[in-house]
Image (tube, rainbow, N blue to C red):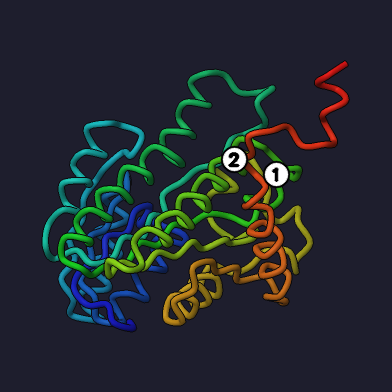
Amino acid sequence: MSNINGTALVTGASSGIGAVYADRLAKRGLDLVLVARDTARMEGLAERLRGETGVAIEVIGADLTADADVARIEARLAARDVTLLINNAGMSLDGSVLENGPAELARIIALNVTAPTRLAAAAAKAFVAKQEGAIVNIASVLALAPEMFDGVYSGTKAFLLNLSQALSAQLADKGVYTQAVLPGATRTEIWERSGKDVDAFPPDFVMGVDDLVDAALLGFDRRETITIPPLPDEGQWQAMQAARLAMAPNLSKGQVAPRYREAVTN
């Protein structure tokens, strides 16, 4: 991998995107720390990759909705050998806010927002101290399409996109690269776990997980801040960014904008 050596810590590594990242990173010569709840599946993956690549692989069973488990992974990120964080663990809801209660909402926020934020912060501090490292946050194209599907899931992914852009701006000159990956619908177990049928989508709507990760890694090697594997026209993303940045000088003013003054004075 371009300019990255050492150890990659991958969350949600027992299946799907995380497991494919583990495969690709091991084949690029990085040692691995695999993190997920399902230790048996991770051990099977680790055994295969050790045999195929010879890299060192550590397996840590952890539930990233649990504060103590997140703290353990924060501590592991602080070790000198870790140079890459793949912040991948996440979940979706079965239904919307109308069908879910406080426990379900708290769980998705814990896993999709609180845990990756804490891990990104821990990694950032460790990487800045040694002036090298990279943080990859797996967000979603739904961060750009809040009207589609469930707003809670897309909101958590918009948070990761925002966090990634801020980290990129703040850490780039300190030797730390940050990438947000925005997959579209991808064929992983997240659909079944959230009560959805991925096969209900049109066949050309769902990307294979291997293709998704390979594209994301190409974006990594190119040092993209935002990688959107299904988007054919990069100019659309660039135009959106340009429009957003053009608003920046007008987003905070000492006076109400003229278009609101009548409403304020009458």
Q: Residues within 10 Å of mark 2 (few under 14, many from 20)?
A: many
Under circle 1, the secondary element is loop
- Is 136 placed left or right of 210 in the picture? left
Q: Position of residue 13 (x, y in %)?
A: 35, 57
| Residue closest to the eye, 234 or 186 | 234
How far across and how far down the image is residue 20, in percent? 42, 68
Pick the residue in front: 60 or 48.
Answer: 60
Separation of marks 1 and 2 at Cα, in angstroms: 7 Å
Task: Give the mark, 1 or 2, whose residue is nearer the N terminus.
Answer: 1
Disc 1 and disc 2 in contact, CB within 8 angstroms: yes
Question: Which three-letter amino acid code belongs to the residue tagged 2?
Answer: Gly
* Rendered view: 228 above or below 118: below
Q: In the image, what residue occupies the spot 72% across and 68% down?
A: 239
User: Looking at the figure, which quarter contains the C terminus?
Assistant: top right
Relative to 237, 178 lies left or right: left
Residue at (44, 40) in percent of width and height:
113
Percent across and percent down for residue 214 are 49, 77
Q: Give the residue number, with chain letter if any, for mark 2.
A: 155
22 vs 43, nearest the viewer:
22
Q: Which mark is residue 182?
A: none
Residue 127 position within the rendered picture, expressed as x and y whole percent measured from the top left: 22, 61
Q: Which residue is mark 1?
A: 146
